[in-house]
Every structure is written in C-alpha cells, then in structure tokens.
Amino acid sequence: MSRSTYRLLAATACAGTLCALALPALAESTWAQAHPRRAEVNARLAHQHAQIHHEVAEGELSRAQAGKLLQEDHAIRRQEQRMASRHEGHLTAAEQQKLNREETAVERQIPR
C-alpha cells in the first residue's frame, strides 16, 4: 500500500470515528433543548419577550422600561442555561419552579 493511500485511509477512519462520537452528543443536545421543563420555561420567556415588544408598540411601555424587563428576561434565560448545564441538559422540578416564579415576577410588571 502506498504512503498516500495509507494516509487517506487513516484520515477517513479518523473522520468516521469523530462522526460516530459526535452523533450521540448531537442527539442528546437536541433532546435536552426539547426537554419539557426547559421547553416550558423558554416558551414563557419567548411569550414575555413578544408581549414586552407589543406593549412598547402600543405605547404602554417606554423603551427604558422595556429594556429593564428584557434584561430581567435575559438574566432568567442565562440562569436556565446554567441550571441545565449542571444536569446534562435538563431542569429539575425545583429549578423549573424557581424560574417560573422569576418569570411571573417579570410578567406582573408588564402592563395589560
């Protein structure tokens, strides 16, 4: 076997091994993002984000007020990501409850 053929086979074997190792991790991260507790928390955050922008457009919130609320939502999202990273991509029931309480506090600040 020539040296270039050997290198090609070795490179192909390495690439195949890397793909085989990456697929389970990819599947796990996809599952983790769709975990029911994370999905519920993130859906609430997305809804609040849209509601804040709607209230700014309606003139019910100033841009400064909206910016404060969006910063609070962003902090909750970062906290959710940190919590999930500790548990292989999912949230515990207690963590979900804590995040929901924080989201409710922000939601109560949005005029309706």
Image (tube, helix red, strand yellow):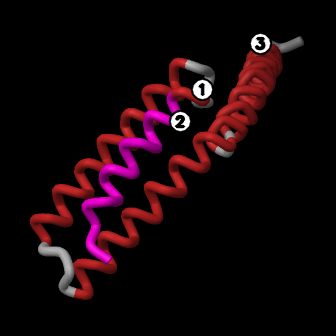
Location of residue 93 (image quadrant): top right
Label 1 crowd bin: few (<14), some (14–19), many (20+), radius 10 Å: few
**In terms of depth relative to the viewer, which is nearer, 36 or 23?**
36
Q: Badges 1 and 2: C-beta atoms under 8 Å apart?
A: yes
Q: Residue at x 51, y 50 (%)?
A: 42
Asked if residue 8 can be seen in this view, the reply is no
Q: Amino acid at mark 2?
A: Gln
Q: Quadrant of the N terminus?
A: top right
Q: Amino acid at mark 3?
A: Arg
Quick one: SS at disc 1?
A: loop
Q: Which mark is residue 96?
A: 2
Vertical comparison of 62 with 26: above or below: below
Vertical comparison of 39 with 14: above or below: below
Q: Position of residue 14 (x, y in %)?
A: 74, 18
Cα separation between marks 3 and 2? 57 Å
Q: Which residue is mark 1?
A: 92
Q: Which residues are magenta?
A: 95-112
Cα separation between marks 1 and 2? 6 Å
Q: Which residue is mark 3?
A: 3
Cα separation between marks 1 and 3? 54 Å
